[in-house]
Amino acid sequence: MPCPTGLPPRAPRRLPRLGRPARGWTATIPPVAAQEGNGVPQNVSVSTPPSAPATPLRYVIATPEAIYGTILVSGVLAGTQPGVPLTDVFFSGILASTAIWTAHVVAVTIATHGVRGNSFSGVRASISLALTHSSGILVGPIVPIALLALGVVGVLPETASFASASVSGLVILAGLGWLALAERGAKWYVRLLGALLTALAGLVAAILKGLI
Amino acid sequence: MSHAPVARLGRLLGTLYLVGALGLLLSAFGYAVFDPAPSPDAPRHALASIALVVSWAVLVAAALLTIARGRRAVDID
């Protein structure tokens, strides 16, 4: 059938690259299904269409809350005044992430508790939902805080620790931007541009957070 | 499928979150109540700082377990 727009059909793009290959399964037809003389072979192994592709790990770990946690700590680092001891920066990062996590848990619990339409969410269910939703706020800042911790205990020089922690958030964001475009089958320079733009967006958000 | 491992993991997660929250409360108490405005030269409150770091580590472990549990649930679905 010709294309209604009159445009030539687009070349098929590369298949999306997912975290794991989609899994199919096979089933064996029992011998009961075959009758003599009908030409149906017995014990035929039939491949079914593959089920829905598994969720890439990126969607499980890199939740909006985790990205927010990363930007949050980057903002704390961006707002650090010169001359502040690294230990204080380290504790400020931990305090910021735990404080926002606590506020997020409380907020989701209050917002989801009660009767909504035909569904009812008790306190326990609401807290469970809030803890699940908010876990990313604690997980996102792990890398920059770990780099700060290495500087606090003396494994890294303080300057290198602070600089690497500051850059790590942007690198993570750039990596996420790259992966998102890679899954769409974009060329490498488009991925690079997307990664840079993602990191830039994170940098702007971190600077705005640091101004507070 | 037996529900015992799921229930055990739920109890473990609840315990971790409770311990982490209590540690946060203790550190907040140590920072805010004992000495709300320490001088810049004063050493950090050791107990409050240790409680903060430990509770943060416990909470991060609980959060990672929560994510792992969610991932497993997705796989089972």
Image (cartoon, coloured by chain):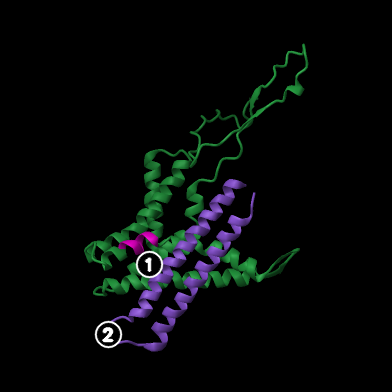
Chain colours: A green, B purple
| Depth order, front residue of A80/B24 | B24
Q: Residue A46's x, y, as percent?
A: 65, 25
Instruction: Tell me the number on the disc at residue B42.
Output: 2
Residue B6 drawn above or below residue A98: above
Identify the residue at horizontal 50%, vertical 34% (top origin): A15
Residue A61 drawn above or below residue A153: above
Identify the residue at horizontal 23%, vertical 62% (top origin): A156
| Depth order, front residue of B66/A129 | B66
- Is B56 placed left or right of B43 in the picture? right
Secondary structure of the residue carrying tag 2 is: loop
Q: Which amino acid does label 2 sit on?
A: Ala
Near mark 1 (Cα within 10 A), the count class, few <14, some 14-19 or many ≥20, is: many
Identify the residue at the far top of this view. A37
The stretch drawn in magenta includes residue A169: no
Q: Residue B73's x, y, as percent?
A: 59, 51
Q: What residue type is labelled 1?
A: Gly
The chain letter under disc 2 is: B
Q: Residue A20's x, y, as percent?
A: 50, 40
Cα separation between marks 2 and 1: 26 Å
Q: Residue B77's x, y, as percent?
A: 62, 47
Instruction: Tell me the number on the disc at residue A75.
Output: 1
The chain letter under disc 1 is: A
Identify the residue at horizontal 40%, vertical 42% (top origin): A190
- Is A35 placed left or right of A4 in the picture? right
Q: The C terminus of chain A lies in which quarter of the figure? A: bottom left
Range drawn in magenta: A142-147
